[in-house]
């Protein structure tokens, strides 16, 4: 329905612009006014509903400014065809030309302000108020300024059309004066804001103050993260480790490299510093850091790996049978921390790459929120969580079931009368159009089945009412969660202004609000409706807790789900023999295997409908310890102990070596270059 509405709006916009020259040449003031109004309104609606289409128009040189210019030229043509006096035409041309000139000037000043407000670093949870960073210009002048400024032509447009229709020129004069006056006032107001940003602190002052704060805090452990295209698609790799970092004995700091990271960073009381440039990273006072943790492999990791005084550890962002969980590139780190014995064995299968002494089993502290199978209460319908992985950076690393069997799987699941939670990987469709198309088809199947169920049942109105009743509170909670996380739409300078040390922990309120949000969400949606989960909420682990069984691919999602001891299914899209598939993939040891045509699905679902008929239950219990490590001591305790031990080792080696000089700053891979084969760090193929 939404797609058809958007298509109708696109056609309406095209028809409106096509009609402008027709009604200008006829001439017809009334119908020109209608067509002009349509183009104004539909243009604005499309910016909200179909921004992708608007961006495609811009690639055809039909951006917003050009569309406004076309509308203005057609209006002047209409005025000429209706024999408007020469002075009216001359005044209209002068006013509209001046308006566009002022728009250009405003854009230039806005660009200058934006550049001045770009700082060499961005921080959170550090008090940098001593820098005296000026407040961001008011949103009315700063945000979406082009959209607002171009619309200042409306008084002149409306006034001239009214004058042409009435035959009196007072409306045109008033409209011209109003457009010109508002445009000049806007530019003058922004110039006043430019004077304020000239007082921005210098680069050296920013680093001096940030280093004063870091020296006072004395960080001992750093989580370092970089990726070429940061968005919420990648920031889960950082967010999953935040709570673990907060529970360490040693003082942690988070170091990011992309400015966009802050938009998707979760709540934390840990100091966070983002330094985009490599040269600037060297300016940070991190001399007390003894352990650096890396959740992902990326080219910019070398900028931190060069610090020889610290110990560098690859912790990853999940444990799976993919390349990222046993890559030779990991040789550049001092240690590799894995969840359980399976991770150690996986690296040992990579010949001549990683020594056994460099691998440490620390468990997965993040998995505490996952409820055990014994504590799960089934609903009226079996709930199947389908969480396929993405298509990977190349076909060689493509493990997704979406392309070969995703649509077939959903069709078979719907035929089995189950409830489906569909949570695709955040990167689904980024590389492959086939994956994107399969993803759309799966969503459409679930949407259509929801409509069918609601039409056939009597609870549809009740469900819709419950959803509507819960919506305000859900939005309120989400807004408060964003506030607690420190997320806002400000620029670098505004982030620095807001980078205060938290007054309190805030974690208790965060957990309570998270729990309330999820309770309201699931209760309002009811126990039988299908859901497509695309946003940060509900979380993956909350989807685990809702599900009776998981269907997934070779990915870290499966290893995490193993913690629940619930039944799970691995897709065998190439129909390999069961023995061969289980030998190739560790997590298949406790899985039901699903063939490409999903013929085994009814039998697999019996493990949910008839829990006593669950022949893989024993294998799952054994696999859990093999993949995730023992339950005792707790994973958090083991992870914390590993951090402490490595930090003590780094401190001892630093004491033996004495004060570091310039020659001591080297790349760890220089010590192991021959063994590592000089393999460069490259994000492609390394994302799990």
Image: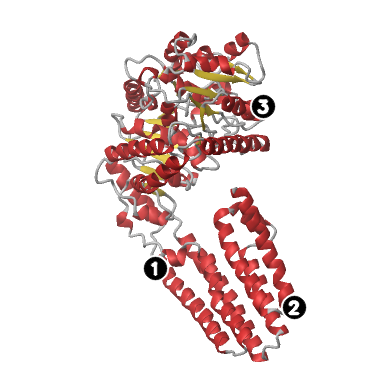
Q: Residue at x 65, y 14 (%)?
A: 576
Residue pointed to by mark 1: 196
Q: Residue at x 64, y 82 (%)?
A: 93
Tell me whether the residue at label 2 lies in contact with that at label 1, contact meaning CB atoms closer than 8 angstroms: no
Q: Position of residue 454 (x, y in %)?
A: 51, 38
Q: Position of residue 566 (x, y in %)?
A: 44, 18
Instruction: Give the vertical position of 445 relative to 619 (above or below).
Output: below
Q: Position of residue 394 (x, y in %)?
A: 65, 31
Q: Position of residue 153 (x, y in %)?
A: 56, 75
Instruction: Give the vertical position of 306 relative to 484 (above or below).
Output: above
User: Dot 1, crowdedness within 10 Å: few (<14), some or many (≥20)?
Assistant: some
Which mark sits nearer the N-terminus, 3 or 1? 1
Eye-nearest disc, 2 or 1? 2
Q: Is residue 664 left or right of residue 441?
A: left
The quadrant in which residue 80 appears is bottom right
The quadrant in which residue 155 appears is bottom right
- Label 2 sits on a secondary structure element that is helix
- Label 1 sits on a secondary structure element that is helix
Q: Is residue 256 left or right of residue 98?
A: left
- Distance from the alpha carbon under mark 3 to that under mark 1: 58 Å
Which mark sits nearer the N-terminus, 2 or 1? 2
Which mark sits nearer the N-terminus, 3 or 2? 2
The disc placed on residue 404 is 3
Which residue is nearer to you in this view: 262 or 579? 579
- Label 3 sits on a secondary structure element that is helix
- Distance from the alpha carbon under mark 3 to that under mark 2: 56 Å
């Amino acid at each position: 329905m939404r797609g058809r509405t958007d298509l109708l709006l696109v056609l309406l916009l095209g028809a409106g612009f096509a009609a402008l020259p027709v009604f200008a040449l006829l001439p017809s003031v009334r119908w020109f006014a209608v067509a002009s109004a349509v183009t104004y309104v539909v243009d604005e609606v499309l910016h909200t509903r179909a921004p992708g289409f608007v961006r495609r128009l811009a690639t055809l040189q039909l951006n917003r400014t050009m569309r406004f210019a076309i509308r203005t030229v057609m209006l002047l043509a209409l005025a000429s065809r209706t024999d408007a006096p020469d002075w009216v035409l001359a005044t209209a041309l002068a006013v509209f030309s001046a308006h566009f000139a002022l728009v250009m000037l405003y854009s230039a000043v806005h660009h200058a302000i934006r550049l001045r407000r770009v700082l060499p670093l961005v921080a959170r949870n550090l008090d940098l108020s001593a820098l005296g960073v000026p407040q961001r210009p008011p949103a009315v002048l700063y945000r979406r300024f082009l959209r607002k400024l171009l619309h200042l032509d409306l008084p002149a447009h409306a006034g001239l059309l009214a004058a042409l229709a009435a035959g009196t020129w007072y409306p045109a004069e008033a409209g011209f004066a109003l457009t010109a006056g508002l445009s000049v006032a806007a530019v003058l107001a922004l110039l006043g804001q430019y004077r304020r940003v000239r007082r921005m602190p210098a680069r050296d002052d920013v680093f001096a103050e940030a280093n004063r704060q870091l020296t006072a805090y004395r960080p001992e452990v750093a989580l370092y993260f970089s990726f070429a295209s940061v968005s919420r698609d990648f920031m889960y790799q950082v967010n999953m480790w935040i709570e673990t970092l907060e529970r360490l004995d040693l003082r942690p700091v988070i170091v990011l490299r992309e400015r966009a990271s802050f938009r998707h960073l979760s709540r934390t009381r840990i100091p966070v510093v983002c330094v985009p440039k490599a040269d600037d990273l060297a300016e940070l006072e991190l001399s007390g850091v003894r352990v650096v943790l890396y959740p992902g492999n990326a080219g910019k990791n070398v900028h931190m790996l060069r610090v020889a005084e610290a110990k560098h550890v690859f912790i990853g962002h999940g444990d799976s049978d993919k390349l990222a969980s046993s890559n030779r590139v990991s040789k550049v780190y001092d240690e590799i921390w894995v969840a359980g014995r399976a991770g150690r064995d996986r690296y040992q299968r990579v010949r001549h790459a990683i020594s056994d002494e460099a691998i440490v089993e620390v468990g997965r502290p993040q998995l505490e929120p996952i409820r055990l199978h014994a504590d799960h209460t089934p609903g009226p319908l079996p709930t199947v969580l389908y969480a396929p992985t993405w298509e990977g950076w190349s076909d060689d690393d493509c493990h997704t079931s979406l392309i070969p069997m995703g649509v077939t799987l959903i069709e078979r699941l719907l035929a089995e009368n189950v409830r489906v939670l569909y949570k695709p990987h955040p990167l689904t469709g980024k590389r492959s159009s086939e994956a994107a198309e399969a993803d759309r088809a799966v969503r459409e199947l679930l949407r259509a089945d929801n409509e069918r169920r609601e039409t056939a049942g009597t609870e549809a109105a009740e469900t819709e009412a419950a959803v509507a009743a819960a919506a305000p509170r859900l939005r309120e909670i989400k807004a408060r969660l964003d506030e607690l996380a420190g997320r806002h739409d400000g620029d670098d300078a505004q982030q620095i202004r807001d980078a205060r040390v938290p007054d309190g922990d805030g974690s208790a309120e965060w957990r309570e609000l998270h729990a309330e949000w999820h309770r309201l969400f699931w209760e309002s949606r009811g126990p039988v409706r299908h859901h497509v989960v695309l946003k940060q909420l509900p979380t993956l682990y909350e989807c685990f807790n809702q599900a009776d069984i998981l269907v997934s691919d070779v990915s870290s999602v499966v290893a995490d789900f193993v913690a629940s001891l619930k039944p799970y299914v691995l897709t065998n899209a190439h129909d390999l023999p069961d023995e061969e598939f289980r030998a190739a993939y560790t997590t298949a040891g406790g899985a039901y295997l699903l063939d490409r045509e999903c013929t085994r699905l009814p039998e697999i679902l019996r493990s949910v409908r008839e829990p006593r008929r669950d022949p893989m239950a024993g294998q799952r219990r054994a696999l859990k310890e093999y993949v995730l490590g023992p339950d005792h001591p707790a994973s958090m305790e083991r992870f914390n102990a590993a951090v402490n031990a490595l930090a003590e080792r780094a401190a001892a080696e630093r004491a033996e070596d004495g004060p570091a000089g310039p020659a001591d700053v080297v790349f760890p891979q220089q010590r192991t270059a021959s063994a590592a084969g000089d393999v460069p760090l490259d994000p492609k193929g390394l994302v799990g």
